[in-house]
Image (cartoon, rainbow, N blue to C red):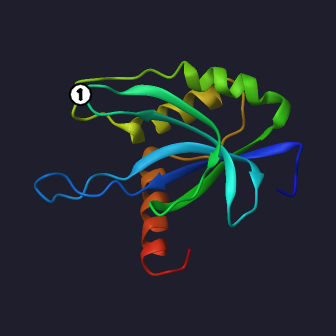
């Protein structure tokens, strides 16, 4: 970590595998920030909607590895001062969670969290829902061909 006064927020995606019928599941998205470690082995915080359609809940994990075998890329979306971390976590903890809605998942949570983050006065990379999805798809393709 080169800059200890700031953290870079990223949207990170992970492979979830296939369902019982063999259909590829949507990638899991979370917001992450590196607090320690190296670029190759980052350690930090993960903010996400975890669970299933019936059990979604807000989850925050501190000081955990940010890259594992299921990692499929991450997109930098904002930089925050480390002194603002508690405020950021408060914003994320207030993002609504929906259950029993087949059209809602962790990706929707990330999108809403970024909008709430911007509305709280933080500077976020300008993204639309479509451009975020395109960027994440591009990262998956880069991972698949070995570019990342």
Could you say which quadrant of the image residue 39 lies in? Answer: bottom right
Counting from the top left corner in percent of width and height, residue 143 is at 48, 72
In this picture, is 56 found above or below 8?
Answer: above
- Badge count: 1
Q: Which one is nearer the viewer's eye here, 37 or 87? A: 37
> Which element type, helix, strand or loop, lies under badge 1?
loop
Residue drawn 75% across and 61% down? 38
Counting from the top left corner in percent of width and height, residue 82 is at 82, 36
Quadrant occupied by the C terminus: bottom right
75 lies left or right of 110:
right
In this picture, is 88 found above or below 16?
Answer: above
Q: Which residue is mark 1?
A: 101
Residue drawn 14% across and 60% down? 22
In this picture, is 63 found above or below 18?
Answer: above
Counting from the top left corner in percent of width and height, residue 72 is at 47, 63
139 lies left or right of 106:
right
């Amino acid at each position: 970590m080169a800059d200890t006064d700031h953290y870079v927020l990223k949207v990170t995606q992970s492979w979830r595998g296939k369902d019982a019928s063999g259909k590829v599941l949507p990638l899991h998205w979370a917001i992450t920030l590196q607090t320690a470690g190296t670029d190759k082995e980052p350690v930090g915080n993960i903010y996400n909607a975890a669970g299933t359609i019936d059990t979604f809940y807000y989850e925050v994990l501190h000081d955990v590895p940010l890259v594992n075998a299921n990692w499929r890329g991450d997109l930098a979306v904002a930089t925050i001062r480390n002194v603002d971390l508690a405020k950021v976590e408060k914003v994320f903890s207030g993002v609504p969670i929906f259950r029993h809605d087949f059209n809602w998942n962790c990706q929707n949570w990330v999108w809403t969290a970024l909008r709430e983050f911007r509305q709280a006065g933080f500077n976020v990379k300008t993204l639309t829902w479509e451009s975020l999805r395109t960027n994440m798809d591009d990262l998956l393709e880069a991972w698949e061909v070995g570019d990342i």
